[in-house]
Image: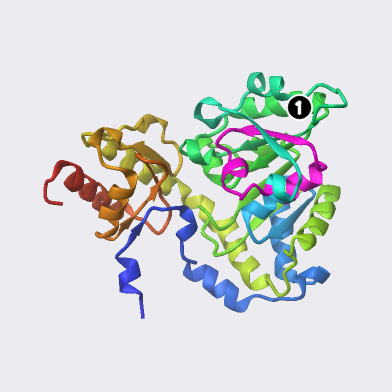
């Protein structure tokens, strides 16, 4: 039976809350499997090969989470005691339990960038000189889209310049592309084209693409060989995991075609929020599926607003005292956005929803 209570909820906390589509469930039920630690799961192998093909890389690696994928990239490119240059609000520096330090033995060296978009002018001053008593720079990390800056997208020319100059400086560039397909849709470009200068790319199957579990790491054969060893070290060696990889294959092939709907709903949501007194948001800056706004002028905290909305079956993510994040995905339709806006208007203007 359908979960009517679940279906009545408009869940905007994240695009990680999506449920597998019927096509994904069928693929999972019918998946051919083997032992992936032995490299014998045919469905995993197909997923890894397909991901590498889409991104124009030599090889791919299926990992349980995006956080593990990022950590494996850091461990593969660096050694303990090095620094990783990243944006100040980057996921690896704020939402991965300091694994960059606790496990990889590195320190994040950050710069606050407008819209979360680093430039070479911001990166270059952070590169350590070759002096023995300085921690050495080991890696440059970019995040596209930039989660905590509202899903902003790197202009391809900016990414290209950073990569080219980093390589001249002897530094690899890793891309946290958790939502890179959203970036590609927003730009009207192919993911291979907008990531081709990066040395490694992690992207999530379980966020906007909607698979229940998993992320991918792609790069050269040698990079993936080392990352596979690191995955085992971290306890990420999975056995008959083709049942999950099958859903990932469906997500990889099918969901990018409909991501534009999430972007349209996010812009519609942002434009509606901008018309509510007390809400501060630049709706023109919303180009993908993440909407972040301030309710400071209302005097109500983000937690209070979130609690009030939750009582009406609308879930969102308070980010700090007055800031709220809402993320659109394929389980939230236009009617859900309308319902959210009506509830926000009722709450903040004290009129019936």
Residue furthest front in the image: 133
Q: Could you tell me how many numbered marks the image carries? A: 1
Q: Is residue 96 magenta?
A: yes
What kind of colouring is applied to the model shown?
Answer: rainbow
Residue pointed to by mark 1: 166
Residue 191 position (above or below residue 66):
above
Q: Which residue is located at x 86 percent, y 23 percent?
A: 131
Q: Residue at x 56, y 27 (%)?
A: 112
Give the left or right position of residue 201, taking residue 346 as reference. right
The percent coordinates of residue 226 (x first, y second) are 84, 52
Task: Point out residue 195 in the picture as x, y percentages from the top left corner.
Answer: 67, 38
Up-down relation of residue 125 to residue 263 (above or below)? above
Residue 116, percent across and down?
54, 31
Classify the position of the N terminus by image quarter.
Answer: bottom left
Residue drawn at (80%, 49%) of the image: 58
Left or right of 313? Residue 121 is right
Does residue 237 appear in the picture of this structure?
A: yes
Residue sitting at x 83%, y 42% = 79
Residue 169 is left or right of residue 206, and the answer is: right
Image-quadrant location for residue 212: bottom right
| Badge 1: residue crowd in 10 Å (few <14, some 14–19, many ≥20) | many
Would you identify the image quadrant in which residue 29 lies? bottom right
Per the rendered image, the range of residues in magenta is: 72-99
Q: Is residue 55 visible?
A: no
Work out whether residue 71 or residue 134 is closer to the camera in this orientation and state it: 134
Location of residue 353 with respect to 164 vertically, above or below: below
Answer above or below: position of 190 versus 39. Answer: above
Q: Position of residue 296 (x, y in %)?
A: 30, 34
């Amino acid at each position: 039976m359908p979960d009517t209570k679940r279906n009545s909820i408009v869940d905007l906390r994240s695009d990680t809350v999506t449920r597998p589509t019927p096509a994904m469930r069928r693929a999972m039920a019918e998946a051919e499997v083997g032992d992936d630690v032995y490299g014998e799961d045919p469905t995993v192998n197909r997923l890894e090969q397909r991901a590498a093909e889409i991104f124009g890389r030599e090889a791919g690696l299926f990992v349980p989470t995006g956080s593990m994928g990022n950590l494996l990239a850091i461990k593969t490119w660096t050694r303990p005691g090095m620094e990783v240059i990243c944006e100040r609000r980057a996921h690896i520096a704020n939402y991965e339990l300091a694994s960059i330090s606790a496990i990889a033995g590195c320190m994040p060296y950050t710069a606050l960038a407008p819209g979360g978009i680093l430039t070479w002018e911001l990166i270059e001053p952070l590169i350590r000189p070759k002096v023995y008593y300085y921690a050495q720079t080991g890696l440059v990390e970019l995040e596209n889209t930039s989660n905590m800056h509202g899903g902003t997208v790197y202009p391809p020319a900016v990414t290209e310049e950073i990569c080219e100059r980093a390589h001249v400086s002897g530094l690899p560039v890793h891309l946290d592309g958790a939502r890179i397909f959203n970036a590609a849709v927003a730009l009207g470009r192919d993911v291979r084209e907008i990531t081709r200068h990066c040395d490694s790319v992690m992207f999530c199957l379980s966020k906007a693409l909607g698979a229940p579990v998993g992320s991918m790491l792609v790069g050269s054969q040698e990079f993936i060989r080392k990352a596979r060893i690191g995955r085992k070290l971290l306890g990420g060696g999975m056995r008959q995991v083709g049942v999950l990889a099958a859903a990932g294959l469906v997500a990889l092939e099918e969901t990018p075609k409909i991501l534009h709907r999430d972007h349209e709903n996010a812009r519609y949501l942002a434009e509606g929020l901008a018309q509510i007194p007390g809400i501060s948001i630049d709706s023109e800056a919303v180009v993908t599926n993440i909407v972040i706004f301030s309710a400071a002028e209302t005097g109500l905290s983000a937690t209070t607003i979130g609690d009030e909305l939750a009582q009406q079956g609308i879930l969102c993510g308070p980010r700090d005292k007055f800031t709220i994040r809402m993320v659109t995905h394929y389980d939230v339709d236009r009617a859900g956005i309308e319902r959210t806006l009506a509830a926000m208007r009722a709450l903040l203007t004290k009129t019936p929803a």
